């Protein structure tokens, strides 16, 4: 827990406060691997956010003008409120509020029950009634039941008398996240946002949103962390750095920080971009990233590789684990940019970079671990690893998570139909989102770990191999376990291609051999311990369905090969090789 607090502000340990995106192609100003132009990236994101807010501002201003003629209580007023909602994609709902702060009209229909609510004590209503100018609130708990911000515009009668207001309730996290995905999808930085009061309003991990940096007891022991946070809160833009000692490392990790401000109608959001400064490390030091903590499957492989390579060469391996580099997508982008040299990554997130990788996770592709070894160690697996080169990776080996199973807190799942309506956490992977949608679930991509999201009911369940369910104590927030084995989950052990090719042939062979040996060691470790993991989960109180109706899952998921994901010719070619072996 100590490490998670230390990494909270600029790592992804307990509180990951960023969204990592690599912009190697999109921003030609990034000339050298590992040296992102954070300011340029952040400027582009800020510009897109301001543009979205300006469009919303224009829509609300037009609605306010129409309502000044129709009146905020008239039948025609509902038409204008409904039109505002339909023209504002980010809107949760749109309302009119009278001069006393009482909600009059609400659209869409599911929120009409909040008509009549008194919101006169909300800070944005107080500001608007005092200043008679448009306002955007801080993020707050709305009467609709979610964390949101309110964009409020005054409405005046034709005589000029104040009549009330019209507003759009929206989620800043959605607006900011969309801008990052659109504008800086490939950026080698991590971006998060907070209000000047210290409230985190955007992060790629929903567990982190809503935390108050300056009052949460978790932050109190870390004076330097709070000091930088106060500087960000006080200044509209600037640069800085933060240094922490990651768990399991003797050396500190330094993160470079750039921040800018998005502002409109009294609202200010601090947008923060963070990049890792690895310093001038010796060429004999290899940086290896994994998202999990010590004792987890990825770490077993990474630590064995470190042991083998250091015993057989002059290289030293620094393992950055426990989320200190961000999510697995973040690690991939840093690996792709050359910030780190090696990674042990779950195959799911890799498919966003290398579409052919989704072949491994084709539902029910493997019937046993013997099938896994035959295919992944054989020609199909070698061909798949070679396909990584087009995206700047050198595929070295396959280690594993194992077969994935479903857990949830709501009900016993026996057949595919039982999944209908469950909110399931998935990896940052188009494949996994599609798979669970086909099964009737609501698929929510979240970074790891997810214990808090499960505890708060943001999600009902998740799917992972037994080792993960046990190691991360998911039994404490999940009652039901169904052994679906719907997907085999590999780790792809990979290197930055440019770095790897720059090494002498002898070194390349040695690194490859050590990674292959470490991967085989880890796979055996996983298989030797599976029965023990299952037994431990039963003892911990999980209700386990060991023989679900797999045929019903197969039937539902057969349609996945007809989706766009498998229409790419390269993907279909490798899939045929796997299916025909």
Image: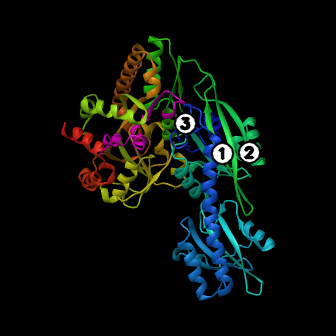
Image quadrant where one finds the C terminus: top left
Kindly identify which numbered label has been placed on residue 272. 1
* Circle count: 3
Percent from the top left, x then y, of residue 490?
A: 36, 36
Image quadrant where one finds the N terminus: top right
**Is label 1 in a helix, a strand or a loop?**
strand
| Residue at x 62%, y 75% (from the top left corner) | 95
Q: In whole angstroms, how far apart are the C-alphas of marks 1 and 3?
A: 18 Å
Query: Which comes before the other along the chain, label 3 or label 2?
Result: 2
Q: Does the magenta portion include 339?
A: yes
Toward the right, the furthest residue is: 130
Other-residue count near label 2 (Cα within 10 Å), few / some / many at <14 / 14–19 / ≥20: many
| Residue at x 36%, y 55% (from the top left corner) | 412
- Residue nearest the viewer, comparing 475 with 229: 229
Percent from the top left, x then y, of residue 350?
A: 41, 40
Q: Are marks 1 and 2 in contact (CB under 8 Å)?
A: yes
Classify residue 267 as left or right of residue 510.
Answer: right
Percent from the top left, x then y, of residue 150?
A: 66, 66
- Residue nearest the viewer, comparing 267 with 317: 267
Kindly identify which numbered label has been placed on residue 232. 2
Image height of 491 relative to 43, above or below: above
Q: Which residues are magenta?
A: 336-362
Classify residue 251 as left or right of residue 466.
Answer: right
Toward the left, the furthest residue is: 580
Other-residue count near label 1 (Cα within 10 Å), few / some / many at <14 / 14–19 / ≥20: many
Of badges 1 and 3, the one in the foreground is: 1
Q: Which residue is mark 3?
A: 323
Q: Is residue 148 something one can see in this rendering?
A: no
**Is label 2 in a helix, a strand or a loop?**
helix
Query: Which comes before the other along the chain, label 1 or label 2?
Result: 2
């Amino acid at each position: 827990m100590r490490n998670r607090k230390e990494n909270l502000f600029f790592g992804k340990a307990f509180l990951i406060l960023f969204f990592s995106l690599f912009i190697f192609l999109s921003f030609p100003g990034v000339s050298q691997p590992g040296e992102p132009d954070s300011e340029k990236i952040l400027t582009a994101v800020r510009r897109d956010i301001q543009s979205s807010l300006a469009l919303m501002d224009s829509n609300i201003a037009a609605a306010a003008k129409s309502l000044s003629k129709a009146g905020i209580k008239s039948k025609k007023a509902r038409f204008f409120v409904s039109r505002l909602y339909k023209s504002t994609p980010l809107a949760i709902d749109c309302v009119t509020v009278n001069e006393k702060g009482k909600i009059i009209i609400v659209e869409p229909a599911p929120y009409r029950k909040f008509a009549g609510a008194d919101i006169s004590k909300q800070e944005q209503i107080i500001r608007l009634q005092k200043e008679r100018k448009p306002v955007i609130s801080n993020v707050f708990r709305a009467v609709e039941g979610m964390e949101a911000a309110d964009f409020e515009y005054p409405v005046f009668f034709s005589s000029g008398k104040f009549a009330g207001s019209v507003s759009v309730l929206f989620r800043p996290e959605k607006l900011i996240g969309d801008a990052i995905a659109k504008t800086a999808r490939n950026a080698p930085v991590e971006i998060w946002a907070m209000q000047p009061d210290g409230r985190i309003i955007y992060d790629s991990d929903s567990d982190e949103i809503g935390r108050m940096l300056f009052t949460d007891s978790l932050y109190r022991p870390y004076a330097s962390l709070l000091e930088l946070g106060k500087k960000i809160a006080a200044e509209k833009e600037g640069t800085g750095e933060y240094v922490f000692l990651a768990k399991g490392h003797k050396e500190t990790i330094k993160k470079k920080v750039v921040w800018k401000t998005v502002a409109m109608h009294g609202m200010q959001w601090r947008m923060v971009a963070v990049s890792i400064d690895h310093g001038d490390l010796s060429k004999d030091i290899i940086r290896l990233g994994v998202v999990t903590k010590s004792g987890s499957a990825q770490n077993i492989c990474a630590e064995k590789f470190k042991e083998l390579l250091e015993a057989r060469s002059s290289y030293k391996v620094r393992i950055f684990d426990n989320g200190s580099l961000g999510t697995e997508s973040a690690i991939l982008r840093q690996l792709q940019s050359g910030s780190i040299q090696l990674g042990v990554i779950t195959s799911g997130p890799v498919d966003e970079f290398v579409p052919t990788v989704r072949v491994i996770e084709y539902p029910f592709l493997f019937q046993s671990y013997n099938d896994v070894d035959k295919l992944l160690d054989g020609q199909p697996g070698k061909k798949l690893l070679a396909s990584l080169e087009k995206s700047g990776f050198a595929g070295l080996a396959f280690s594993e998570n194992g077969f994935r199973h479903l857990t949830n807190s709501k009900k016993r799942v026996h057949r595919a139909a039982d999944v209908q309506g469950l909110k399931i956490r998935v990896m940052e992977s188009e494949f996994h989102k599609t798979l669970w949608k086909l099964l009737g679930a609501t698929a929510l991509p979240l970074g790891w770990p997810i214990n808090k999201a499960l505890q708060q009911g943001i999600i009902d369940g998740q799917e992972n191999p037994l080792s993960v369910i046990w190691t991360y104590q998911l039994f404490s927030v999940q009652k039901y376990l169904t052994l679906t084995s719907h997907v085999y989950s590999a780790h792809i052990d990979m290197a930055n291609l440019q770095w790897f090719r720059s090494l002498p042939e002898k070194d390349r062979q040695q690194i490859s051999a050590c990674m292959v040996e470490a991967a085989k060691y880890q796979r055996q470790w996983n298989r030797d311990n599976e029965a023990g993991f299952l037994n431990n989960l039963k003892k911990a109180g999980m209700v386990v369905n060991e023989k679900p109706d797999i045929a019903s899952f197969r039937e539902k998921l057969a349609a996945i090969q007809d989706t766009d994901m498998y229409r790419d010719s390269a993907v279909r070619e490798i899939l045929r090789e796997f299916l025909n072996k």
